[in-house]
Image (cartoon, grey):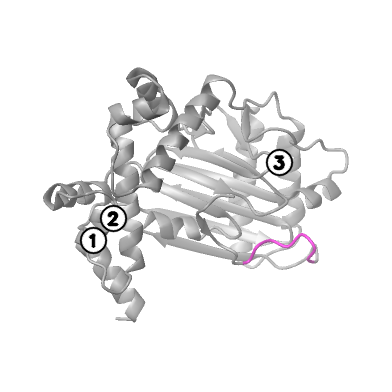
Amino acid sequence: MLNGTASTQNVPDHAARQDAPWCARSHRSTDVDEHASHLSGWRQAYDQLGSGGFEGRLDEAVSAGVQLFRERTSQRLRQRCEVWQGALWCGITVADDGSRLDGRLVGADGVMVSGEDGGFELVSPAGHDIVGFVVSREALQSHAPGLELPRAGGAGWWAADPARRHAALVHARAILVLAEAGVSCDLRSAMLDVVAGLLDARGPERRERGNASARRRLVAQVRERIEAAPDRAPSVPELCAALHVSRRTLQYAFEDEVGVNPLAYLRSVRLNGVRRLLREAAPGLTVQRAAAHWGFWNLSAFAGDYRRQFGERASETLARAAAARTGG
């Protein structure tokens, strides 16, 4: 189970009436964790890998057993995601942007799909714009009885017919607009038709295997080591020795998986960890204590790194979170 931000707000209920009204909402956020928490029913953890202030927007509509969203994010992110139980996700980027799904580059006209367990990792670039179709497997099978759903394995993607892919995006935009306007007639059926059409015409799915799987495990092991002892940042030689890999192997794994070198990734994970502590604004917490917890002992260097990463001072993050906690 993914340990991350979970939202249980308005989880789509496939047992509800098929003519149940749609619930539409939009959120804007300047914090990546807050943004990740807005998607109803999902369990998510986002790390900001790019430098600068973050801006995110989520437009979402949910009804009985279906969920449609459009998500826009300004910075390069590593997203660890898990859809609500019994659901299937299809994702289409508005433009081919070089996203990576479970370590595999999503190619031109790609349509992404979750595996049977519902979990996946997505590394998205700056300026990412994606539409997500999420449906109850039970609802989809009831709507299209002969449709073969993805079963074994993890998440994957396939290259769709460009016209069908474009039509799916057009339908998604229309459904979001109509749901927000309170028009719900036949929208659920229309969305299930779109997903069924995408799946029915899908080609061979491309999933992680071999070297890609090994690289992904290597990155995960590094992250586990950071989180197990956050106050002690390991060096690259120490990581290589502990994981029994060469420096070149480690470098290639990080460049392929997350698009940054190991040192930059280590710094990003720790800076994101500090930011989460500051946003909790626990009584007595100071910037110095939060930084030390994640192994930043040189406060001057930390201050510069933090501001470059998030576009604001650490003290500003803490002050805003403390004011929100006290209602000030």
**Rendering coords of residue 144 (x, y %):** 84, 44
Identify the residue at horizontal 25%, vertical 48% (top origin). Answer: 295
Pointer 3 residue: 116
**In this image, 67 relative to 218: left or right?**
right
Residue 73: tell me if it is visible: no
38, above or below 147, in the image:
below
Q: Earlier in the sequence, mark 3 or mark 1?
A: 3
**Which residue has dot 2 on it?**
293
Instruction: Name the magenta segment's main secondary structure.
Output: loop
- Kind of residue at badge 2: His
Up the image or down, 79 lies above or below 155; here it is: below
**Residue 311, horizontal then vertical, whole percent:** 24, 52
Mark 1 lies on a secondary structure that is helix
Residue placed farthest to the right in the image? 145
Q: Is residue 174 left or right of residue 45?
A: right
Mark 3 and mark 2 in contact (Cβ < 8 Å)? no
Q: CA distance from mark 1 to mark 2?
A: 6 Å
**First reached walking from the N terminus: tag 2 or tag 3:** 3
- Amino acid of disc 1: Arg
- Identity, as a three-letter code, of the amino acid under mark 3: Glu
Q: Nearer the viewer, residue 313 or 166?
A: 313
- Displayed quadrant of residue 319: bottom left
Q: Kindly identify the residue that appears in the image at 44 percent across and 49 percent down.
A: 46
Tell me where residue 181 sits by quadrant: bottom right
Badge 1 vs badge 2, beta-carbon distance below 8 Å: yes
In three-dimensional space, the C-alpha distance between marks 3 and 1, rounded to whole angstroms, equals 42 Å
Q: Residue at x 53, y 50 (%)?
A: 70
Question: Range of the magenta residues?
Answer: 10-16
Name the secondary structure under disc 3. Answer: loop
* Residue located 28% across and 33% down the image: 263
Question: Which residue, given by chain and number where applicable, does mark 1 sit on?
Answer: 289
